[in-house]
Image (cartoon, rainbow, N blue to C red):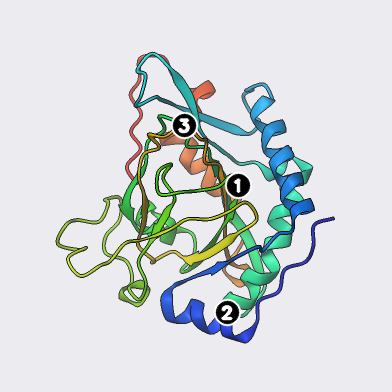
Amino acid sequence: MLEELTLNKEQINNFKKDGFLVVKNGFNNDDITKIENWTTELSDLPEEPGKHWVFHETSKLDPKLSLINRIEKISPFHQGFAELSSTLKQPVAQLLGEEAILFKEKINFKMPGGDGFKPHQDSQAGWEDYADYFISVMVCIDEATIENGCLQLVSGFQNRGLFREWEPLTDEDMAEMEFIHYPTQPGDIVFFDCYTPHASEPNLGNSTRRLYFATYNKLSEGEHLEQYYADKHKTFPPDIDRVEGKEYTFRV
């Protein structure tokens, strides 16, 4: 069993002030070793329709090389990650002020040559069709550095709300924003809300940067995981379910 996680009053207040919270050594060495092993198990599983979703990308360092970009919809098919997503619900519930329920989850692999993510708010990806507010939790699996594309966050803009759906943030939007790099070590945890601007740069180094992300909404706003993935499958399915010759575009 993973160790339970509890936030203190100062941490909760800092989250409300900044829109995010960085918790160093949130998981102990034994727990992060389990999570690392689960991640390896998951990436070694065969890609099958109706199972976990695997997405690939072309390496920015070698255009002939295909890399795992991310894996989604994990907990229904892996007991370890089901335990992890359940463990993370408790501190998220503290931040939400009520019981939390899993909305979506993924592991961003960002191998050497992996691309980054443009500055955005998570709710720009149409999340408000399902619930009003979300909190995501990032668990660092490998050391994340500036060189391999660690998370960048902006504090204090979460109260601005949603800029617009389905488009990254513009230069005008970001004129007064300061994106700060947050390097993390295995076991570190980052909580951030759906309106907090964030980004990451490509990994042009030689070390893989795997990060697990779980997103939750208030239980009172319903359970939407299956509907979210059913809707997403129509426009951006996992690679194994794609129709040959059809173009699929990741927008935010």
Q: N-terminal of the two: label 2 or label 1? A: 2
Are the residues tagged 2 and 3 within 8 Å (C-beta)?
Answer: no
User: Which residue is denoted by mark 2 in the rendering?
Assistant: 11
User: Which residue is denoted by mark 1 in the rendering?
Assistant: 226
Which of label 2 and label 1 is nearer to you? 2
Category of crowding for the residue at label 2, using alpha-carbon neighbours closer than 10 angstroms: few (below 14), some (14–19), many (at least 20): some
The picture places residue 249, in percent across and down from the top left corner, at 33, 33
Instruction: Name which residue type carries label 1.
Output: Glu
Q: Which mark is residue 206?
A: 3
Is residue 147 toward the left or the right of residue 251 in the image?
Answer: right
Are the residues tagged 2 and 1 within 8 Å (C-beta)?
Answer: no
Q: Residue at x 31, y 53 (%)?
A: 119
Q: Secondary structure at mark 3?
A: loop
The picture places residue 178, in percent across and down from the top left corner, at 28, 66
Q: Residue at x 33, y 55 (%)?
A: 120
* Residue 37 to residue 89: above or below: above
Q: Secondary structure at mark 1?
A: helix
Q: CA distance from mark 2 to mark 3?
A: 34 Å
